Image: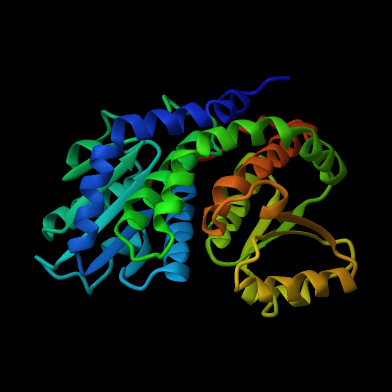
Amino acid sequence: MNYKMYDEMMEQPDALRNTFESEFPAMDEASKAVSDADKVYLVGCGSSISTCYSVRDAIRMSSTNLNIEVYAGYEFCYNKKLVEGENSIAIFTSQSGETADTLAALRKANEYGIHTVSISNEPESSMIKEAKTPIATRGGTETAILGTKTYITQLACLYQILFAASDYEYKTELLAELVDMPKMLEKLLISTEDENKQLAQEFKDEDIFYCLGSGPNFGLAYKLAMTMLMEGAIKHACPEYSAEFRHGLIERAEKDVPIIILRSDFESDEITDKAIEFSKNLELKSIIYELEDYANVDKLLSPFILVIPLEWFVYYLAHFNGEDPGATRHIGKVRY
């Protein structure tokens, strides 16, 4: 048993190394443009928008000088508040560089004279060709649907661009840890497989998972539910901010219901802890991923670390249900 996703997971450290070696000048150019802009738009779809959510919330928790808004592709197109010639920058993320929604948003931004940056894994894609500042992540072609090396490289580019332009007190240390991230990923890919294989065996018959996280972990919870569990493992899943646990989800939080909680000891994890305690009291099947169990890094880098054990969990969850975690049934067939 060796699905394509396996190979692409193992390629993540080198993809990240190669991206930093090749694309740092372009990221630096984008960062300077961010520093000069009044507003930053982050635009993506699916796994790509999850990276936008994570970096937006990481910046909001740590910095005061950047004004960031996140949009799905077509929602950006329908935004009536765009002004021609406005002093803003729009950063677009897409694995293929041909995502119809995101490409339409890029073209609208270009029409409005907004500085455009594209982050894509395909150097010859339309988004790379049409952006003012193109950044081609160096992961090689990715075929598995879950987005492993494209996720990690996109997220790293966004962190590098935005934190370099931020007033975060510890940004120098954070960016140094980001550059060192490939070494951490190599260790995690080895050390977290067996435990999550066993966990997947235990949960293989569950049909629905709730996924919670606060701060930048919400973006990862979104990816986990929307693209990893639903697209990869063919399981029903729902992402929520930890603070929203007590609205709606709390009425479905019942004995033996699976809930995956991401925790990194953020200040906002005070609310995460309340959800953990409530779930314990009601005897939910809680799976808790704690940053401190895997690495000693700036907490804001949590999504880079926690995604690795989650990838193994979903990989084996799909396998134990007779599914290829990198295959699709409908994605790619539907175009709007």
Q: Nearer the viewer, residue 311 or 252?
A: 311
Q: What's the residue at 47%, 65% (across, down)? A: 57
Q: What's the residue at 11%, 58% (across, down)? A: 113
Quarter holding residue 15: top left
Q: Nearer the viewer, residue 225 or 179?
A: 179
Q: What's the residue at 69%, 41% (across, down)? A: 314
Image location of residue 278, percent across then percent down: 82, 75
Q: Nearer the viewer, residue 306 or 146?
A: 306
Q: Can see residue 143?
A: no
Q: Nearer the viewer, residue 240 or 166?
A: 166
Q: Can see residue 179?
A: yes
Can you say whether 70 is above or below 336 in the image? below
Quarter holding residue 198: top right
Can you say whether 100 is above or below 167 in the image? above
- Colouring used for the render: rainbow
Q: What's the residue at 26%, 52% (across, down)? A: 31
Image location of residue 205, percent across then percent down: 84, 45
Image location of residue 141, percent across then percent down: 42, 25
* Residue 53 as seen in the image, left or right of residue 86: right
* Residue 292 as seen in the image, left or right of residue 120: right
